[in-house]
Amino acid sequence: MTTSAGFARRPTPTTGLSYDERRAYLFLTPLAAVLMGIAVFPILYSFYVSLYSIKLTRPQRAPFVWLDNYVVVLSDPQFWGAVERTVIFSVIAVAAILVLALLVALLLNEEFPGRRVLSALLLIPWAIPYVANALMWKWIYDSNYGALNGILYQLDFIDTYMVWLGDADKTLALIANAFVWKEVPLAAILLLVGLKTIPADLYSAAKVDGANVVKRFLHVTLPALGPSFALVLIYETMMAIRHFDLFFILTEGGPGDASHVVAWRIYVETFRNLSFGTGAAMSYILALATLALSYVFIRALAQRVTT
Amino acid sequence: MTGNLSRRSFLKSTAAVGLGCAAELGGIARAPAAEIINFATWSAAVDTVKSHLAAFEAKTGIKVNYSNLPWAQYRETMITKFVGNAPIDTLWVSDSWLPEWADAGWLVPIDQYKTLTAYNADASDFCNQSMIYKGRQYGLTYYTDYMGFIYDNELLQKAGIASPPTTWAEVADQAKTVKSKGLSEWPVLISLAQETWLIEFLSAMVFSHGGRFVDDNGNAVMQDGGALSALRWLVDAVHKHKILSPSCVETGELAGLKTFSSGQHAFGLIPKYRLRTLNDPSQSQIAGRAMLALMPQGEGGSHATVGWMRFYGMTPRAQADTTRAENTVKLIEWFGGKADGEYRFQKLLFKDVGAAFGVKSLFNDPEMREAYKAYGDVDLIGKQQALARKKDVISPWFGEWNDVNGASWQQAVLGKVTPEQALKTSAAKWAELKKQS
Amino acid sequence: MAPRVRAQRLRLRHLSRIVVLWAASLAFLVYVLAPVAWLLSSSFQTEREIVSRPPHWIPQQPTLQNFTAIFAAKDRSVTYETRRAADPATGGYIPSTASNLVPAISNSLLVACAVVVFNLLVGVPAAYAMAKIRFRGRQASIYAILATRVIPDIALVVPFFLFIRNLGLLDSLWSLIITYLAVTVPFSVFILVSYFESLPDELDKAARVDGCSRLQTLTRVYLPLALPSVVAVMLFAFLASWNEFLLALMFTQTPKSQTLPIIVASFTSDFTISFSFINAAGVIAVIPPVILAVAFERYIVSGLTAGAVKG
């Protein structure tokens, strides 16, 4: 109805773009430049690198090998072992995060004195750098002087100091614990946001129907949290699959193979074995797998939202 | 259509802008420092090095940028630096990496510098040989040593054991005695963490069991023979006799040194030069009790152990510029050769840290002989030295094979695979890498 | 139901609710704070005390020596006479790289601030455009932006490393600023777009009627209203840059450009270094981001709730 709106929509004869569209593209240019130059380009370049056999310890030769690197990677049992470990780690971590974040979100959703303080303290694990988190847990898990040993010993749960990170059966779970501790705050906030959108009348209606706390939780809260859960699930799975920092600092893939996950494998292949070709191929496979996984998740999420 | 055209050109222009920006920012590089020599080491004898450097700077006026990294991850960290073109002129190198680093072009030969090669005549053959690759010499000796079998005399006496073990079977028996008397929970210390030291611990075990990783032709023989019996001994020590802690796969050499020096173990595989630290009252709780014994022999084995040497290498970057090359050579000579007419750094290193020198004439130096007596049986030390053998896995692909081999041995010790399987994996990896090269 | 019984039942329910809340709060506090408290406690202990078994939960001989080593670390000149003959191998060793912590902090600070500024410069106009302007490819662009973040960092490291190396940008803060920008911008744009979308369109039209250009509409009308999300974006971008490790590990070679996480990580792998010192370094790494996060906590939640609690 306003002339300015109409003015904005009329295409100019020279470029064919309306004023609005030109402005939009202008505002988007820096973003597009950044993403093009720094996100899109490396992805394409990575594929290009993966088609060559490049070993930095043999700088003279870099033959073109088509998809040979991919064949080598996909037929390497070490790679599939790493995939298995990544899956185990991610499942443990994401399950723990969902449960703990839900509990925290439920707690912070209640009104009680001191809730604001708890909310603020919740952010501490999230704000800590991954490196500091790793260092902290490495010290807690230390076999000789660590706090975990100390506390269990003082409470008489164990009678001598145990090996933690060096015990191949426990390694992944312990690393997952350190990861979960740091991820719970953000997941809890996302779930809290979901909780806050549940209209209070739903709860009142349920109460009138005679539902107690547990029933209200199961039939009102959980279903309404569906989308938030899905969001946390997707996000945390993505983070768990790609996580590197804790593996680098806590165990460097050890002991033996116990924590040798795909992200670590890529690092070793690229920066220790200096085989950039296979390293690029591996990282490309990981990228494609992550994309596929997120696509599947988002489709499932979209379905749940629409049904 | 005009609309489509503009969108395509928009995309093209943003791509160009993006790449252009990135390229322009590349122009903001800094000018290389001409006068400073970059000296990279691992964190050993730090103050000794610093004091010697202070003297160097005072005498020659050449400034040195000295940096040190943990030895346990030295190879990995240095490789990232090499690949990242970090400025390094001279550095400490382990004999294990010479072929790999020389082939990759990160080290350059130094035999054209006559001031340096003049020292070869006075250096032990073991050292000289270890620095030669494809007929060229790549450095001057930093130090040389071997893996020692060290025992805590007091614990043995308390357990009623008259003399230290001579075979690995005896080690197991004596360890069980010590343990049953409640003197130590894990009488045997062998550090099997995946770090730079690991290959030396493993080689000592393998050689003393009469085995080898690789034969003279460079083919893998690790899948049976002495290597297999060595691995079997380790597995039994952890799971059957329970004399070696399962945390050994997590324990590095330094951590092991710390626990040994607090009297928690009766026997340990420890680099011989650590005797100096172990017998120093200000640094160790078992001062006076740590003694060297000949490496126990396995069945069909011998008292052989593994010897190694580390040297000063030079990088292409140093050689590229004449002044820098000259200065770097001066620095290498100051440390690896003579400083002010004497082997000062070697003597300091020996006095401070106990690190053995590769210089023949120093063996006759009375000061050195006195110092040796302070912490060990000089004759025994010499006897074991004669039986120290070079690692047989030194090759251009050592780094990558070492990771796999270390993980395999750890898997076996953890009980995840059998020793046969573990060694088969190692052998297969060796064959694969050898074929690829 | 008799009123007294009902009142009793209400009180009981009220009481049990309080008990449950308090128990849960306590468990929560222990879970969140205990590890950090231990980190803090360890940093104030001497090396001799820190290796006690079982550990001393509260330092019996608290000391500031670890922190003074970080801040007062000066390369003391070492001569033959003043050298310490002890082998650093026995531990209790304060590394010479301790003096790199303070420059690393300044590097981290520079990079984080630059990333925040660029995030806003790049993200705010883009978010405004995507939220308020109808243009072709709008829907797709939002998905495309999020899709770039699905690729794991480790997959980007290889090509980016080679690319930056060829540009000679390795070991410079710019390599970090550029990569961190790419890593943080998608999430920033996502937050800003959500928030902008929740702001009424009428303001836009009203501003246009008043004769504002698009840019002026953005800066004068929407930006002030979108302040919570802008603060949230600044916080996220700052923290993401401050905490980032993998890319910094790849691109920085010397203390000239190394950021705090890299220096701290280098301590954890060096067994010669005293445990208490490592913990002190950890505390230094932790304090700035925690202070920021706790201080601006309110904006994080409101920045994320944009659009969720619509009327």
Image (cartoon, coloured by chain):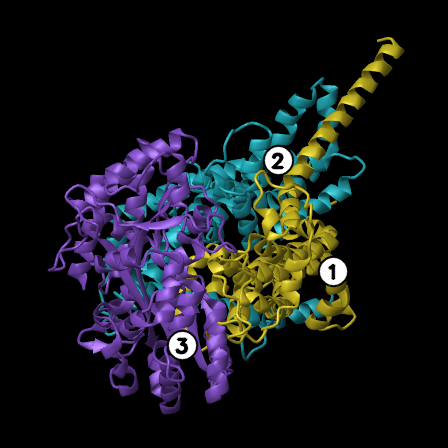
Q: Share a chain, discs 2 and 1? A: no
Q: Is residue B44 visible?
A: no
Quote the CA–CA distance across marks 1 and 3. 67 Å
Q: Nearer the viewer, mark 2 or mark 1?
A: 2
**Where is mark 1, residue-wise?**
C227
Chain A colour in the picture: cyan
Residue B204 in picture, x, y percent from top left: 26, 51
Q: Residues within 10 Å of mark 1 (few under 14, many from 20)?
A: some
Chain C colour in the picture: yellow
Choose between B194 and C7: the one closer to the eye: B194
Q: Is residue A30 visible?
A: yes
Amino acid on which the number 1 mark rests in the picture: Leu
**Where is mark 2, residue-wise?**
A102
- In the image, which lettered chain appears purple? B
Q: Are marks 1 and 3 in contact (CB under 8 Å)?
A: no
Q: Residues within 10 Å of mark 2 (few under 14, many from 20)?
A: many
Circle 3 marks a residue in which chain? B
Disc 3 secondary structure class = helix
Viewport quadrant of the N terminus of chain C: top right
Disc 1 secondary structure class = helix
Q: Residues within 10 Å of mark 3 (few under 14, many from 20)?
A: some
Q: Are marks 2 and 3 in contact (CB under 8 Å)?
A: no
Residue A193 in picture, x, y percent from top left: 67, 43
**Where is mark 3, residue-wise?**
B344
Residue in the picture at 18% in, 61% down: B436
Q: Nearer the viewer, mark 1 or mark 3?
A: 3
Q: Is residue C302 left or right of residue A26?
A: right
Residue C8 in picture, x, y percent from top left: 84, 14
